[in-house]
Image (cartoon, rainbow, N blue to C red):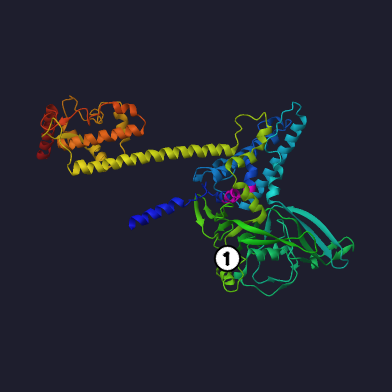
């Protein structure tokens, strides 16, 4: 029954597919903010697919018209983008468990021992990337216009100017309505992220009020005069991202010192300002405003208010004032700031693999699976009174959640479908530039092909090492069985001309042989070029006169009975044949078996050199006399 049980377990294990964890990132000192940001970006399929299509312009040095400043900036950004591309490609498809970001950090001139805010870092990086992409587009368009040879010099940076806006970019409309003349004015503004204040648990928004969208450059809590329709209080346990977003998107009342300058009334009037989304981004980057300025201490401090994270977020898509539609976003990544200080601490990231739905916690090099997602997340669709509300109540909010990435459902589905295509199809999608680039240099190898080759080579080496270890384990196991059978149980038959006389063998060799801890590959390798497994001279066994062993050397060996010696020799010969077979050297198998040693030291015959023995006795006697006199 036990055998059947083990067999069933083996069958079940053979049908299971193990998921390898994503790569971790080495902390260079205080670069946890960089690592957590890169882990969030690595799972953003729209972003990485676009970045993988970028190529370092091989002819951009000729396109600056003598502007050395632009050339310097482009050279630096090319280094930044190529190293970032390499890191993200290795994080997604590479063979290494831990990846070093030193090249990327050096290209950005980051101080490894200085911590930065991940959002400020990402904002600055994206701005520089956008500038570089657009400048490359302009240069390539000019090059295409001036190219009269008919050959295309287009690189894959062409069209990447819209990458970041197409992934993170949204647009909203400010609508301000005068209370006196009822005239409305509109102002559009683009955004790449939303900075959302955390709801004050003393104030609750009216459920009857319809929320309105806002911007990443949204005003801080103190900049608004007041919000409409506020009432009662809420429990701190009820604070979640959906509530913060709804509160943040409420209409704003402009009165008192903050009255609106009406162009029609030609005076300051009370007014209501709403914000309507004209366009929602595929990836909504929400930053919880945990860092606030303390007017009492005149310094920045961190808000430790606990906020629960809904796995599904509804954002109103208000195209007009008449109504709005809800766009659903899925929680896919959370950056957490551990610590109570706004000037220190540690950043980690909880990120979901878009294709598998598996959540991971990334703490620099350490990567662990999060079953069910972040501990502070909950499913808002569970609304039954019996278990739904209880489930929500049991989910404790996070005081560390800082930066959130929500992905629109349709966009998430589309990107996952692309990612699940065969690898060569994904490569062709990001390398369409090569089909039209007849002048691309041969060393301009795309990053996915490079990482794929790297992964294949790593797999080949790992397979080679695994096969080698398996064969070595098989040889060691066979040796162990033969030692038990032929040496300890004494089933071998003596066949030695020195029968009756013990034979000396070096202890180091015997220790390796009987311990069965290694395959003794070095001995078998050197034996192929010698006449025996043990070369007496290589073991420094012979004395200076080469007449036998020096007494000091003899003490480091053991005397074996002839039948035991012969058994050891036969085992070594058989294992040597297995070694040669594993190495593919079958031609050497036709050679006669090698003896255990090229110089046998037999007890009572040539074990100890007489001259060395007399000299050793004399030396020992002199030392004894010195002790005796003292």
Which quarter of the rendered picture does the N terminus lie within?
bottom left
- Magenta-span inclusion, residue 494: no
Rendered residue at 57%/74% (across/down): 386
- Drawn side of residue 592 relative to residue 357, left or right: left
Q: In this figure, which residue is indicated by the disc labeled 1?
A: 397
- Magenta-span inclusion, residue 42: yes
- Drawn side of residue 345 relative to residue 483, left or right: right
Residue 428 point in image, percent of width and height: 63, 39
In which image quadrant can residue 334 be found?
bottom right
Choose between 579 and 269: the one closer to the eye: 579
Rendered residue at 25%/35% (across/down): 572
In which image quadrant can residue 177 be found?
bottom right
The majority secondary structure of the magenta stretch comes to helix
Res 481 seen here: yes
Image height of 625 relative to 92, above or below: above
Residue 409 point in image, percent of width and height: 65, 56
> Magenta stretch?
36-46
């Amino acid at each position: 029954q036990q055998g059947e049980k083990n067999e069933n377990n083996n069958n079940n294990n053979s049908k299971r597919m193990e998921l390898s964890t994503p790569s971790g990132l080495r902390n260079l000192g205080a670069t946890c903010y960089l690592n957590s940001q890169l882990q969030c970006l690595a799972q953003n399929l729209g972003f990485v697919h676009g970045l993988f299509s970028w190529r370092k312009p091989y002819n951009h040095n000729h396109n600056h018209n003598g502007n050395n400043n632009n050339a310097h900036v482009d050279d630096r950004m090319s280094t930044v983008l190529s190293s970032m591309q390499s890191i993200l490609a290795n994080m997604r498809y590479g063979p290494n468990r831990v990846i070093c970001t030193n090249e990327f950090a050096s290209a950005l001139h980051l101080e490894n021992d200085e911590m930065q805010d991940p959002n400020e870092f990402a904002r600055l990086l994206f701005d520089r990337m956008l500038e570089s992409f657009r400048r490359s587009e302009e240069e390539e368009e000019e090059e295409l216009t001036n190219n009269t040879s008919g050959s295309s010099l287009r690189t894959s940076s062409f069209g990447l100017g819209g990458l970041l806006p197409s992934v993170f970019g949204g647009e909203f409309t400010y609508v301000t309505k005068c209370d006196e003349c009822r005239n409305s004015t509109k102002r559009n503004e683009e955004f790449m992220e939303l900075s959302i204040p955390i709801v004050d648990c003393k104030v609750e928004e009216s459920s009857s009020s319809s929320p309105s969208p806002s911007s990443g450059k949204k005003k801080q809590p103190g900049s608004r005069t007041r919000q409409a329709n506020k009432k009662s209080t809420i429990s701190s346990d009820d604070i979640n991202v959906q509530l913060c977003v709804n509160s943040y998107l409420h209409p704003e009342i402009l009165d008192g010192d903050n009255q609106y300058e009406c162009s029609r009334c030609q005076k300051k009037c009370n007014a209501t300002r709403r914000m309507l989304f004209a366009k929602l981004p595929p990836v909504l980057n929400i930053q919880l405003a945990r860092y606030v300025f303390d007017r009492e201490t005149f310094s920045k401090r961190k808000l430790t208010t606990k906020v629960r994270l809904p796995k599904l977020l509804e954002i109103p898509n208000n195209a007009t004032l008449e109504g709005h539609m809800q766009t659903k976003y899925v929680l896919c990544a959370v950056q957490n700031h551990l610590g109570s200080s706004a000037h220190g601490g540690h950043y980690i990231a909880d990120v979901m693999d878009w294709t598998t739905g598996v959540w991971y916690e990334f703490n620099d090099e350490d990567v662990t699976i999060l079953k069910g997602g972040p501990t502070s997340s909950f499913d808002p669709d569970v609304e039954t009174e019996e278990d739904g509300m209880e489930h929500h109540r049991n989910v404790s909010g996070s005081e560390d959640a800082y930066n959130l990435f929500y992905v629109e459902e349709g966009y998430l589905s589309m990107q996952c479908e692309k990612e699940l295509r065969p690898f060569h199809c994904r490569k062709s999608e990001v390398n369409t530039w090569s089909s039209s680039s007849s002048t691309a240099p041969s060393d301009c190898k795309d990053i996915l092909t490079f990482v794929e080759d790297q992964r294949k080579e790593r797999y080949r080496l790992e397979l080679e090492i695994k096969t080698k270890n398996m064969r070595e384990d098989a040889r060691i196991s066979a040796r162990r069985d033969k030692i038990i059978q032929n040496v300890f149980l004494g089933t071998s038959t003596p066949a030695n001309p020195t029968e009756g006389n013990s034979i000396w063998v070096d202890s180091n060799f015997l220790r390796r042989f009987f311990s069965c801890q290694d395959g003794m590959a070095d001995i078998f390798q050197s034996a192929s070029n010698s006449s025996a497994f043990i070369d007496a001279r290589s073991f420094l066994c012979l004395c200076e006169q080469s007449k036998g062993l020096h007494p000091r050397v003899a003490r480091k060996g053991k005397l074996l009975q002839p039948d035991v010696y012969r058994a050891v020799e036969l085992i070594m010969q058989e294992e040597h044949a297995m070694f040669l077979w594993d190495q593919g050297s079958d031609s050497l198998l036709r050679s006669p078996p090698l003896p255990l040693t090229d110089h046998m030291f037999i007890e009572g015959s040539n074990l100890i050199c007489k001259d060395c023995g007399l000299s050793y006795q004399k030396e020992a006697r002199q030392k004894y006399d010195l002790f005796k006199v003292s």
